[in-house]
Amino acid sequence: SQKIEQNSEALNIQEGKTATLTCNYTNYSPAYLQWYRQDPGRGPVFLLLIRENEKEKRKERLKVTFDTTLKQSLFHITASQPADSATYLCALEVNGNQFYFGTGTSLTVIP
Amino acid sequence: GAVVSQHPSWVICKSGTSVKIECRSLDFQATTMFWYRQFPKQSLMLMATSNEGSKATYEQGVEKDKFLINHASLTLSTLTVTSAHPEDSSFYICSARDGGSGTGELFFGEGSRLTVL
């Protein structure tokens, strides 16, 4: 069966540390993998996109890696801040126009 | 960035009635929009892909007669929950991709929280 799993339903880290979130998938062949942030009661907001032929992508304090052999993406937030506290979702784009989301990881950055 | 507007934000209805949720792309044209459903503390579940001018493509297990989708223009898609029951209570979110932006990202509406009494 097809699955998209994000390890750690909840992750607590100290302010200033690097948060690392994991997204693993099975039985998908995504052309793109995206990461979104979702705050309670709101719609998700796009953060980063990485293509299947890219290994790593960076944007300010964010870094994403994509390993199609392991079927895994890692999402890093460096120098984390309390304002980074939110739920983070990975999403796979398959078949050119279908998006499937992972289970989400709730990140709490402790001051 | 592009803006997707969803209406209503909150709706409470009686069991057996139908509810329509609108999703509009405000500053771009969206040939494709996506409808998701999200239960508390769970991820987004893709319900259907809405294509402008044609029938929606529903995911397995989603009843197309229950969740009617209409995408009559490049800026508007609607989801109608017909004969709603308490188990249909959920957070419904639409999204669209700006075909002209080239970035591939999805822009999401703010969601519509449906409570069926």
Image: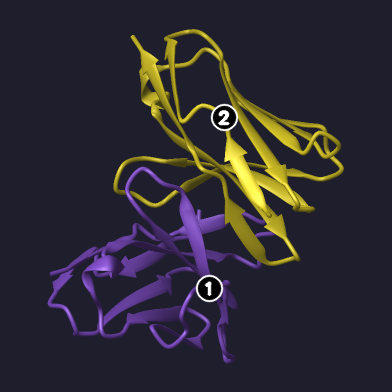
Q: Amino acid at mark 1?
A: Ala
| Label 1 element class | strand
Nearer to the camera, B40 or A48? B40
A40 up-or-down from B76: above or below: above
What shade does chain A have? yellow
The quarter of the image holding the C terminus of chain A is top left
Shown in purple, the chain is B
Query: Which x, y percent locates residue B111?
Result: 34, 60
B104 up-or-down from A102: above or below: below
Numbered circle sitting on residue B61: none
Label 2 crowd bin: few (<14), some (14–19), many (20+), radius 10 Å? some
Q: Which residue is mark 1?
A: B48
Residue B28 makes an appearance in the image? no
Q: What residue lies at 57% left-to-right and 72% top-to-bottom?
A: B59
The quarter of the image holding the N terminus of chain A is bottom right
A100 up-or-down from A12: above or below: below
| Label 2 element class | loop
Q: Which residue is mark 2?
A: A7
Q: Amino acid at mark 2?
A: Asn
Horizontal placement of A30 versus B101: left or right?
right
